[in-house]
Image (cartoon, rainbow, N blue to C red):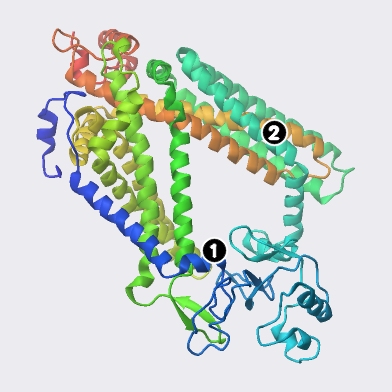
Amino acid sequence: MGCCSSAAQSSKREWKPLEDHSCTDVPWLLLFILFCIGMGFICGFSIATGAAARLLSGYDSYGNICGQKNVKVEGIVNSGLDLTHKKYVFFLDPCNIDLVHQKIKSIALCVSACPRKELKTLADIQKFAETNGSTLCSYELQPSEYTTDPRAAKLCPKYPVPESAPIPFFHRCAPVNISCYAKFAEALITFVSDSSVLHRLISGVMTSKEIIMGLCLLSLVLSMILMVIIRYISRVLVWILTILVILGSLGGTGVLWWLYAKQRMSVGALETQIAKDNLQALLIYAIAATVFTVILFLIMLIMRKRVALTIALFHVAGKVFIHLPLLVFQPFWTFFVLILFWTYWITVLLFLGTTGSPVPNEEGFVEFRMAGPLKYMWWYHVVGLIWISEFILACQQMTVAGAVVTYYFTREKRNLPFTPILGSVNRLVCYHLGTVAKGSFIITLVKIPRMILMYIHTQLKGKENACARCMLKACICCLWCLEKCLTYLNQNAYTATAINSTNFCTSAKDAFVILVENALRVAAINTVGDFMLFLGKVLIVCSTGLAGIMLLNYQRDYTIWVLPLIIVCLFAFLVAHCFLSIYEMVVDVLFLCFAIDTKYNDGSPGREFYMDKVLMEFVENSKKSMKEAGRGGGAEGRELKPMASGASSS
């Protein structure tokens, strides 16, 4: 698979961008196909064992599937009934939810109709059965016995029976008024100990729902405007972002302190709990904004000499989007495919929850359990969720890398293929799916232990000692850092594969050698570029958050700000990240192409550069700066030194 070749051999091998195409990592593609066949087997097994019918049609506590004839379960009295005309599942106590086992602790029956109005007494339940022909008590009781039989208190639903309606496609009677689930909803929010705080938070969201929707739309508009700026005025983008973020951070910090001072002066007249909460929240926001502004200034001061590198790279990236405008839509296609896969995965998971053989439990009812090795199928299913999701994301990375590589290593941009993105997809499907499968599997190997450790940490919360808690968090943090490093290396390996059609291990070694040889330039271009894109995300989030503070300031007497602002800022960040992630990926691919170009070419006849004129000007300016620094001994010349010795030769 190419893992045994030495780094020396990789460095000596000649780079021939886009000249040869060959299949890479074929064994890993076969392994991935076999794994997907296993995922299909789990789906087929769950459907073949009746899980699909039990999930969609529903079943009662005695193992009978509603809406059909059933087979007798040994040892269960009310099993094996003909319930052809009883198509809906009805719970005697639908609001009795077991949070530990995540199920409704109630007897389930099959009924012919759900109660469409509230039934307050046993007489009402009896009248409903006689009028609608739907018996809501257990099968052994006749409607005439509802008000006379002493067993009715246990075998009939807890009254008042709430008004309910069948859930579409799943044939379960669910209460129309979900107020009975309020206790369940509050229990999920474990970080809130005072229910009054929860109610104030929820009321704040409901009161400000129009403002929240408007601010989310604003974040979408700002992200689109920023993409237009990136595409058409990339030369001044870095300076615009730098100035706007500095002004925005200063302005936002000033406004927050002004609002805090203004509200503190008026808090004496508003002795409400909400006013005090908002005052405290404003103080926290103002302090956090001040700390953020100071850190931002320090970072700007340190990186001010490297802005020129980012300007050149951003300009070329802007040209890439001008020639390949469909790149902007890649996250949407990837998200759409992920949604389809996740929908399939959740559906199969629900099938697995009802798969197995009927077994009597301690209460005399039926549960469906899998025995033997089959009960571990859900582990295989979870691994499939991670691996296939990472595979889909890696396909996007390889597609973007292939399209950008085609743009960079085409000397005459007018001679670009009509659809470089479709060409990249075609090369991916025909040659490089095995490489993508291998790279995504490596990420999966790191994600699974981290998720297991996070699950253990959650389960042991409050039980383990301080040392164990610290070790768990340290392991989780180390695995997270390893995952991020591998993700970055994988992306560069996909770029190397797109350039030379080499397998994953060889491409990873080639990319790693290039990055190590140009470690300082990697920090100068890649880090600054990512940082500027991060500033773009910060600008969108800060602008949206500041607009939210100004709008919510008019509702400060009856709305708590915390939850609405958190919702708006999270949505703004996700939208900005969705738009700018592709730009960030293009910058990374361009950097590796530029590093390879400057290492193996020097501009002489027969070794001409592939790079854009803007990057070529940057190389020439770097040479001049290096010569001046060599005469003056200054540090700035070393800062602007070209990326490789081949590019610095005269």
| Nearer to me, 229 or 299 | 229
Quarter-wise, where is residue 184 in the image? Answer: bottom right
Q: Residues within 10 Å of mark 1 (few under 14, many from 20)?
A: some
Residue at 76% x, 43% y: name it: 279
User: In the displayed structure, would residue 414 be above or below residue 540?
Assistant: above
Residue at 71% x, 68% y: name it: 114
* Label 1 secondary element: helix
Q: Does the rendering let one see residue 475?
A: no
Is residue 503 found left or right of 470 in the rendered image? left
Residue indicated by mark 1: 56
Q: Could you tell me how far apart the alpha carbons at marks 1 and 2 are, in whole angstroms?
A: 38 Å
Q: Residue 396, how many percent across, how many down?
A: 37, 36
| Nearer to me, 551 or 441 | 441
Q: Quadrant of the C terminus?
A: top left
| Mark nearer the viewer, 1 or 2 | 1
User: In the displayed structure, would residue 228 be above or below residue 443?
Assistant: above
Q: Amino acid at mark 1?
A: Leu
Farthest right residue?
269
Residue indicated by mark 2: 214
| Nearer to me, 249 or 43 | 43
Q: Residue 309, how many percent across, how many down?
A: 37, 18
| Nearer to me, 270 or 371 | 371
Is residue 118 found left or right of 484 in the rendered image? right
Mark 1 or mark 2: name the one nearer the start of the chain: 1
Q: Residues within 10 Å of mark 2 (few under 14, many from 20)?
A: some
User: In the displayed structure, would residue 485 be above or below residue 581?
Assistant: below
Quarter-wise, where is residue 243 in the image? Answer: top right
User: In the displayed structure, would residue 306 be above or below residue 565?
Assistant: above
Residue at 28% x, 30% y: name it: 519
Q: Amino acid at mark 2?
A: Gly
